[in-house]
Amino acid sequence: MSGPTINDFEDAIEAHWHGRPPSSLEDVMALYGVLAVAESGGELYGSASKLAPFVDDGRLIIINIDLTGDQPAVTDIDIDALRQKHVDKLRYAHKKSGQGSKYSITQIGSKTGNKAEKVVDTQYGPLGKLAGWATQDSIVSLTEERGHPDTWVIDELRSVLKKKSESLKFVEETLLDLLPPDESIPTAVTVRLRIDGDELAASDKTDTRWFWPAELDVLEEAMKRYATANATNKNIDSGPTSEGIGTGVVTGQEGRVVGTPESPLGVFSVKHPDAQPGLRQDQSWRNYPVGDDMAMLFNKSQDLIEQCVRRRGGVETYALPYFAGELTAAKAQLLYGAIQSLDSESEYDESGGAPMARVTYELRESDDEEVRRLSETELRFYTITLPISDDKNVIAEEPAAPVYWVSELAEAVAETVQGPTLSPRLGGFAQYDNWSLLDFPDEFDEARKFAFYRIVGQEFTDAVFAYRGDDEGDDFRRVVDHRLIAGTPLDASMLFDEYMRRYNDASEDGEVPPHQIVVQQLVHLEALSRTGLLSGIDVQIAPNNTSMTTDTDLDTSDISAIREDRLESFLDRPLFDDPTRKAAGLAGVLVGQISWYQESNRGMGRPLDSKTRGDQLTKNSLENALTTALEKAKVYALDSDYDSDQDLLFPETVDRLLDETESMPSDWQLEKRELQFCYVLGHAHGRRSMPVAFDLYDGKVESETEEQPAESTAN
């Protein structure tokens, strides 16, 4: 089947769109319903496009029933390849939820195929669903009320196809004889009825002939009744249904409304009345009034909306793209194409599954200048995060998220990872494979693109925040994601707390976590600061421009000189302009250096930093660790092979530390989590001080090729 044309979108908008730009979740669901109507060739209730997987590759079973005799009878059964020429005749209408019958008399099996025994299954197979169609409550009520002059046709169908009847048994046995038993083929089942046209009130045919489902108005009416009934009684087991006269929640027009429409996100449902105190199920139409046609738009929107979700860590985040301006057929077609692009495999890593990134780049990288302009000026995303459970409470929501802030943040991430922060020669750390915020391409635009994927793919936050289990309730990480997309700054004290909790999460059996944990957090903090999305701290985090020296400025002929130059560059950042923060950082550097020396040169199994965990650090415990480190620096100097260390091990660190503060940590005026972060940041540098110096001295540059395990992304 070919895709919808520009005329299909124009007709769908004319018939079903309210005319104003989207402003609510219901607006966006209705918009996606309009796109689905265009996809269905203008059908609000029909779903012809759902037969696409069956056309040419599937089979069509036609049960021929003669209604002209004294008793209705199955005359024969035709089996044919399902061709495009059949589609309009079948009048298929899809029902996504549940295992029961589809809305139309035409029923389908699995699009991946069914064997013969599954086709004739009288409960779940397409034959069983066809037999059960006429027994649906809404269709039975149509015939009982004589809601259409030709309901006798449905009565006859019900009698000939009722469960356990001889006629249905005949169909079942015949199909088992006709169908190959072991061949699984996509299968559609329908009926063709022989009727005297004079007996039909709603037909212009007067001769006796075979009628396809699409040629019988009564089957159309029954299909609509079945489809709309779900919107009045879903999850209402007994008693009156939920319907009345009110103002539609989307259209703003007065008319008949229903209270239990199918919602793709399930954000309003009478399934859990305990979560909505005071809600009367049969009066839910007053709380959530939706018109009949709008309920069907919601229903049809499900498949398109489902392509825009990312499920991870016990929550699902929908990023639903739309254009903020007037909806035109051209914009609708463009939006539809961008959503359909989500089906293809990403050329990037697994974060490429994030719909917001995929749609953004589908539009922004278009060859059409007008498309690129629209993506810059009007592209918005309705983002909403929910738990993966029956109880669909909203964790976080942003109705009109632009790509502006994500783009700005992505650029800041690219600047950070390509700056001194991840340059060993400039006092920084390094990139590492398989670490979300430390693994980027060398080319700036590609790095920025990867960063965009990391941000909207939730890895930017997940890489540095504390783990949270599925049973811990609302996931604060997703709330933070929504704030970043909306351009809301994050408070530094909250970040430091999350960083230290993650530091704790990453430790195993009391071991000091990999230094990459802290480096990722530094990249995170620096990128937020560059973008203006960091509050609650009085300085920028990014290194000073003076750190951007050239490689030739580093003297690599002497290990001690390398250490000193790298330490000077590491400290040359506004975060350490404050003497107390710098002292905390230097304390971490010294503890890290001494601990490395104890492991590497003295073979100690429990070095100093194993007793001074950063996430458990207090001013008193730091004072004890620092005192011990200063003492060891004097003792271990006797073992050093370097002339500069004869009086004091790592003198470049000790001298700066003693120059920086005259007081001990117990007197420092620094909030606990900020103290801990400055310490672990310095510790990460100190632990790598000698190994990196050796690499640079030997003409090597520490890089992402270094053997390092990837961190778990568990929740």
Image (tube, grey):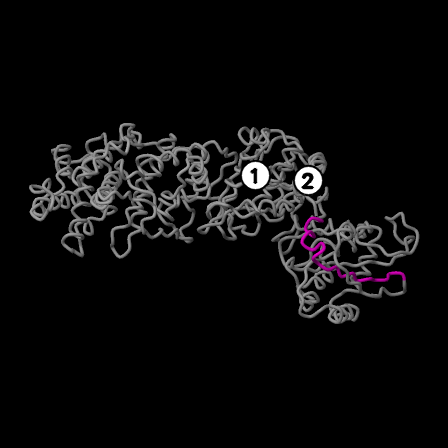
User: Number of callouts in the render?
Assistant: 2
Quarter of the image where one finds residue 483? top left
Q: Which residue is mark 2?
A: 245
Span highlighted in magenta in the image: 48-68
Decide if residue 498 is on the left or right side of residue 119: left
Position above or below: 687 against 414: below
Q: Name the image quarter holding residue 184.
A: bottom right
Residue 578's x, y, as percent? 22, 30
- Residue 561: quadrant of the picture: top left
Q: Along the horizontal axis of the image, is 74 left or right of 537?
A: right
Give the residue type that dot 2 points to.
Ile
Of 454 and 273, the residue lying toward us: 454
Other-residue count near label 1 (Cα within 10 Å), few / some / many at <14 / 14–19 / ≥20: many
Q: Residue 91 at what x, y percent from top left? A: 76, 51
Q: Position of residue 535 (x, y in %)?
A: 34, 31
Instruction: Report the mark closest to the observer, 2 or 1.
Output: 1
Residue indicated by mark 1: 25
Foreground residue among 186 and 440: 440
